[in-house]
Amino acid sequence: MIATIETYLTIGLGHYLTVSVILFCLGLLGIMTRRNILVVYMSLELMLNAANLALIAFSRFNQNLDGQIMVMMVVTVAAAEVAVGLALIVSLARHKLPIWIDNLNKLKY
Amino acid sequence: MTIILFGILFLPIFSALSITFFSQKHPSISAGISIAISCITFLLTCVLCAMTQSQTLPIEIVYTWLSVGNLSVDLGFLVDRLSLIMLFVVTGVGSLIHIYSKGYMGKDPSLSRYFASLSIFMFSMIGIVLANNFLMIFIFWEMVGLSSYLLIGFWMTKGSAADAAKKAFLCNRIGDTGFLLGIILVWSCLGTLRFGEISNLLSTNPAAFSSLATITGLLLLCGVIGKSAQFPLHVWLPDAMEGPTPVSALIHAATMVAAGVYLLARGFDIFALSAAWPQGLDWLKFSTLDVIATIGAFTALMAALIAVQQNDIKRILAYSTLSQLGYMVMAIGLSYPIAAMYHLTTHAFFKALLFLGAGSVIVALHHEQNIWKMGGLQKRMPITFWTFLIATLALCGIPPLSGFFSKDYIVAEALHKNAYLGTIALVTAFLTTFYMGRLFFVSFIGRTRSKVSDHAKENSTIITMPLILLAIASVFAGFIGIDSYLMPHYSSQSLANTNMVFPYPSIDQAPDNWFKMLIYPFKHAPMAAILSICAVIAGGFLSFIFYFNAKNDILSSKFKTVSLWLKNRLYFDELYQNSAVWLQDKLALICDFIDRWIIGGIIIGIIYRIVDLIGRFCRFSQTGNIQTYTAIFVLGIIVLSYWVINW
Amino acid sequence: MLLTSILLLPLLGALIVLALPASLRVLHRTIAITVTGIAAILSLFLLLGYQGGIQGYQFIHEIPWVPSIGLNYRVGVDGINLGLVIMAAWVSFAAVLVSYEIRQKEKLYYFLLLLMCGGVIGTFASLDMIFFYAMHELALIPTFIMIGIWGRGEKKVYSAFQMAIYLSIGAMMVLAGIICLYAAGGAQTFDMEKLAGIYSQNPMPISLQKWILPLLLFGFGILVGLVPFHSWAPAAYTSAPSAAAMIHAGVLKKFGLYGIVRLILPIMPQTLQPWMEILVIMALINAIYCGLIAIRQKCFAQMISYSSLSHVGFIFLGIAVLNSIGLTGAIFLMIAHGFLAALLFALNGRIYQQIGNTSMDSISGLMQKMPFIGMILSATLMAGCGLPFFGNFVGEFMIFFGTWQSHYSWPTALAVFTGLIISAVYMLRAIRRILHGNLSSIASTAIDAENTWRKLPFILLMIALISIGTYPIILTNKIKDPVNNTLEPVISLTMPDTTNSDSSK
């Protein structure tokens, strides 16, 4: 009984990846369905972090640091992206422009 | 020696450069530089002649200009009797005309440009004379074409002058196309372009060209036809009279147009090869020399005929030049290069004199060139009158003037070798006297025909001095033994396969005093001498009857059709305009059409339309909504991953 | 180091111009003139320092870049590109000098122009294929932008796009070809010299050559304007500002021809012969067809664009006949034509700037108003129809002799005909229309080059053209040895039995 619980509780690569995939899919759904640009943005971050989680998991189970390095890269890029992205959103809001994503379709044919 | 040669060749271009860079704003300085340098080159030529008296000729000095693979082109000087004589003519007549130009062109605002172009001409012409290989001749050949272009078009604001310049250049270019191809053939058959080596090779192995001999000769002949304005490329020379008169005298009478004859004499070994045609063309039996003789004779006759009905003094002289050049070319065709060079030399003197005399008249008459508006000039312009008379007599071939000797050799040889050519030569001699008589009686003798000729006055010394000097040369050039001077040049070459004729059986038998020289033509070929004198007398008599004190041209009123044809120069210009020029125009039109409408319009248009159409459809996928894009993106990833996993 | 400094100077200048504020207009121009001037003068030291008779490249400067894939920065010259580098440097200098016509957005203009200058010098100096290609692109992209912004006429945007599309396709084909060369025989190097060495030891498989050769040939062909891929050229050159047209038509276009000499001839000799026979015909079509079109043009700029295409036909011919005389002539003509085209477009720019159009129907008698420009223009047009003592003549006659030597008899005749007559017809026509005759009213306000600075670019280019024309041995002696090396594999393959092949001398 305990042993079986332990086998369930010993968290393997699969668990990490499952969580990562769930997070990723949540993020994707968020991007595809939410209208508020800020929420879309948060969903995007969720996806990035889902990928980070997978990378760290691989790094842990493959016993090398490549994944960690990638994560550092992603975090750095994400930070820069947030800075630029949020600045864009704030400037949209300041100009009293819509921040609903389906209204931002100026690049239509 | 080397320094002198370099000086002769490069001083004129130095003069042109210094005029262009330093004295463009000071016409008199430019004229001074140019005249001084042309006189220096003449003096240097005399020094050169004196130096070569004691040396064995030819002397060859060679520098490499270019050498790639087995093609090697020299900057080389070839000094032999042929080049010395020609050099003498070019620099001598050239200096006199430089001086004359100062008087003739004195008030023109672009005098510097004039003298710079004239210096370029001297440079190029001397280059042709001194060249030791075909490609160097070709290079300077093109350069004289350029200077001729610049000088014919000197008054470029005048449309007719600019057109004439263009026409001259293009006609020359047509000839030069053949010339360059001929040079390529010579090089590929013999492997060298130097005249000395060519004649050695051909004397040891006359069959070096195998089946290409005649074609090579004919291609080289194209260059001559262009430059010496022989039929069928003769049309540019009369138009070239749009240039200033001294230019007509120097370039279009005395020197440049004679360069073709010089080339024929220079490359005589190649032209004299017996007929050889490649397979498929061997039914053509004639040799290069036959073609040369025919073209020369035809040009001589045709030009003389046209000259009979021209009214512009310079155009008459231009056609006369054509006709005399035809004589020279014919002489070459009869394998008689010495006579050709002899006639070239004497012709240079008296034809330059005729042009300069015409120029003197034109200046005095304020640029009136129609002979029917002249007349009565013998009292008003005595020096011009007498010198012009001497030149006319020399051209017609009255003994003991120089023209008689040189022309008589050609007529005698033509009669001896080929009765048709001989007849043509005699008829041409008759016509020559006739049109020259017409020109002379109408423009100089009799009543004045217009106001301007009434007020004509003799020109200043700067114009008359060259006339007098040239008149002296025209009188005595027959007595200095040009033919016997040239003989060693040709007899030293072993021309195995030519039946070249020399004026004397051997150099020792050449007449050594003036009297023997005078009677030699009568001893040598009495028939020819008498016949040609008869022709001259007949021509002179007829022109006296028709034109002495005539009010208008009797011939043109009596023979209307013929006169119209002759006046319109047998409609050659119209013929070319409607054939060659038309063809080229239409070809260009077709190409332009293809480029503009087929390639530029249809092909590019079709490709453009197709791309445009695809774009129009594809753009509907761009909804502008990020979420749509994301959905498509995700779908794409799913499809791709499915594909990758199940691969 | 010398080569590196020549090609880096303009690029450095570009950066300085970029760093300066846009208001310092005089300074931008001064910097541009200074850097290109120094580069031009330095390039002469190449000529002085080049030692003939030595195998291989000289003035080599090498910096490892990505050694693991065999990509290095490597520049050097031999006889083939020596003249081209010098020509590029001097034409760049002249192009900067004529740029006084630009009066707006000067900072951007000089930045782009200096990029172009550095690019054209770099592309001919590079011995590494990737740099060779990248430098070409570095010069090409500013051309599009310059036509779009400072171009002339209403169709400038269309022309810029047309050119961009054509040349991008060509460049992509070349890039693909270069990558194929890199990958094909397991060479794994981008170095042209090593590549030629490797492929001469173990030839590339014929099955690959069959594809790579046409890819490269037509890629380069499009970049040069081989008929029927030439429509971009007249349109673009008519619309381009003088400097862009000068550098592109004069120098950058030679990239394709130079590429054929460097990347096709020594590397793929086995499949060369049939393609080169086709190229002879295409070259003749180029020369004659474009020459005939030039006769019909009303606009001077169009006419010189077509004449330039016609001349390029001769260069193709010289390459295609595959012998040392023809190829030496072709390389010589590349250099001479570089100067000539630059001069023509500079003059065209001057006339356009003074009169506002270059239609030969409406301009006439310009010689009276512009004696200096008129003189240079006549001389240049004369040079263009192959007058001796100008560089073009030397190149052309060597090509004619070379064509005959390879037993192309009719092509020789046609080439001589085109070179001597057709070119003379359109060149003389231009002189007659523009310079001679009565002064037309539209031209009456034109003024000649005001001072020495304005005259300098014309004088420099003219001196260059005349000096290589009067003293050609200075270049031909340097060109002929590398040319023989380039052709050695071809000649040893195609005529193994001939004893009197031109490599014997």
Image (cartoon, grey):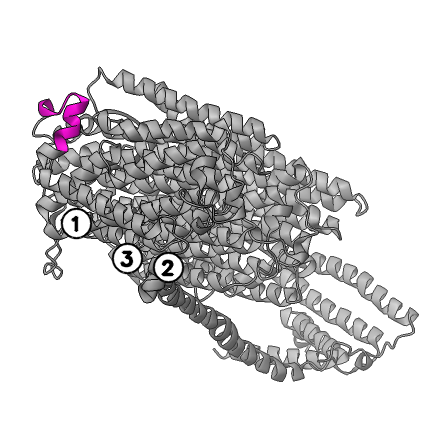
Tell me the chain of label 2. B
Q: In front here: C320 or B96?
A: B96
Q: Is residue B437 magenta?
A: no
Residue closer to the observer: B537 or B284: B537
Give the number of the mark in front: 3 or 2.
2
Q: Identify the element where label 2 is drawn.
A: helix
> Which residue corresponds to the image point at 61% horizontal and 30% vertical from the top-left?
B26
Residues flagged by tags 1 and 2 on a common chain: yes
Q: Are marks 3 and 2 on the same chain?
A: no
| Residue plotted at (39% across, 61% down) | C288
- Given the image, on which type of amino acid does mark 2 rest? Lys
Residue B518 falls within the magenta-colored stretch: yes
State the residue position of label 3. Answer: C273
Q: Amino acid at mark 1?
A: Thr
Which stretch is magenta? B507-521
Q: Earlier in the sequence, mark 1 or mark 2?
A: 1
Residue located beneath label 1 in the image: B288
Q: In the shown orientation, is residue C423 left or right of residue A37?
A: left
Crowding near the residue tagged with mark 3, few <14, some 14–19, many ≥20 C-alpha atoms within 10 Å: some
Q: Is residue B617 above or below residue C273?
A: below
Q: Position of residue C429 (x, y in %)?
A: 49, 56
Mark-to-mark CA distance, 1 and 3: 38 Å
Question: Are there few (<14), some (14-19), or many (20+) residues within 10 Å of tag 1?
Answer: many
Residue at 47 percent across and 23 percent down: it is B36
| Same chain? Circles 1 and 3 | no
